[in-house]
Image (tube, helix red, strand yellow):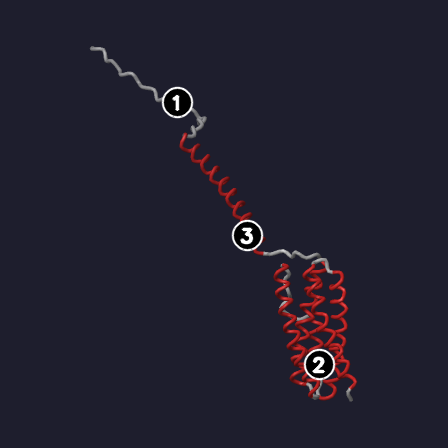
């Protein structure tokens, strides 16, 4: 019999059960590096932008050139001046006596001018004035508003005497002790007007 030659059996390769690490391609490494660089750059830009905004904000806020005592005087005077005009305006509307009404009109005119001068001085010195009267002044206004006739006149004159005595004392101190020469000069120049008001209100109080 002819000899039968059997073909060789091929053996399948045995796969390893351990997974070989997949090499990271150069493009992937470059991509991660680029992302990290972009993140750092963005953070730097964000910090710079925040700093720039803060600088702009600070530049917009003009700081006061006055010391604390002078600045306090300017602010307190601004509050008192607004209250004076508001109360005096009420006096022009509700005063029973003609001379009291006339006095109230003078107060409105004079203190409006004083307030305008103060506003210019405050702006030049970088001091921000309040736009509203104090709660105490508002309470005084509301109380006075309820009065009428002779009671209104008497209460109004008493309040004007009290407020002008306080203002004169503050202006005398500022005229002598203010560190800023312009504040000192303005206080001294305004003082005669306040003293005239006080003299007038005391004269009116003597009228029965």
Task: Give the mark, 3 or 2, whose residue is nearer the N terminus.
Answer: 3
What secondary structure is found at the residue carrying circle 3? helix
Which disc is residue 56 wearing? Answer: 3
- Give the residue drawn at x 60%, y 56%: 62
Seen from the viewer's position, the closer of residues 6 and 99 is 99
Which residue was labeled with disc 2?
Answer: 144
> Which residue occupies 67% across, 79% down?
106
Q: Position of residue 78 (x, y in %)?
A: 67, 68
Q: CA distance from mark 1 to mark 3?
A: 72 Å
- Residue in view at x 63 percent, y 73 percent: 112
Q: Is residue 95 above or below residue 162?
A: below
Other-residue count near label 2 (Cα within 10 Å), few / some / many at <14 / 14–19 / ≥20: many
Name the quarter where the C terminus is drawn. bottom right
Q: Position of residue 87 (x, y in %)?
A: 68, 78
The residue labelled by disc 1 is 14
First reached walking from the N terminus: tag 1 or tag 2: 1
Question: Which image quadrant: the N terminus?
Answer: top left
Tell me if 43 is positioned left or right of 82 in this view: left
């Amino acid at each position: 019999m002819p000899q039968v030659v059997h073909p060789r059996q091929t053996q399948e390769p045995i796969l390893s059960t351990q997974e070989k690490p997949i090499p990271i391609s150069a493009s992937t490494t470059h991509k991660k590096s680029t992302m990290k660089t972009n993140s750092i750059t963005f953070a730097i830009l964000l910090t710079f932008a925040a700093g720039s905004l803060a600088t702009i904000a600070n530049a917009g806020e003009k700081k006061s050139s006055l010391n604390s005592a002078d600045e306090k005087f300017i602010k307190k005077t601004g509050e008192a001046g607004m209250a004076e005009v508001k109360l005096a305006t009420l006096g022009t509307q509700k005063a029973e006596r003609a001379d009291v009404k006339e006095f109230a009109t003078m107060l409105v005119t004079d203190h409006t001018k004083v307030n305008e001068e103060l506003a210019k001085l405050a702006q030049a010195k970088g001091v921000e004035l309040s736009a509203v009267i104090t709660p105490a002044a508002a309470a005084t206004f509301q109380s006075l508003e309820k009065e009428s006739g002779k009671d209104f006149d008497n209460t109004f004159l008493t309040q004007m005497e009290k407020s002008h005595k306080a203002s004169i004392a503050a202006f005398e101190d500022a005229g002598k002790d203010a560190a800023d020469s312009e504040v000192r000069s303005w206080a001294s120049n305004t003082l005669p007007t306040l003293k005239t008001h006080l003299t007038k209100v005391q004269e009116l109080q003597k009228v029965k």
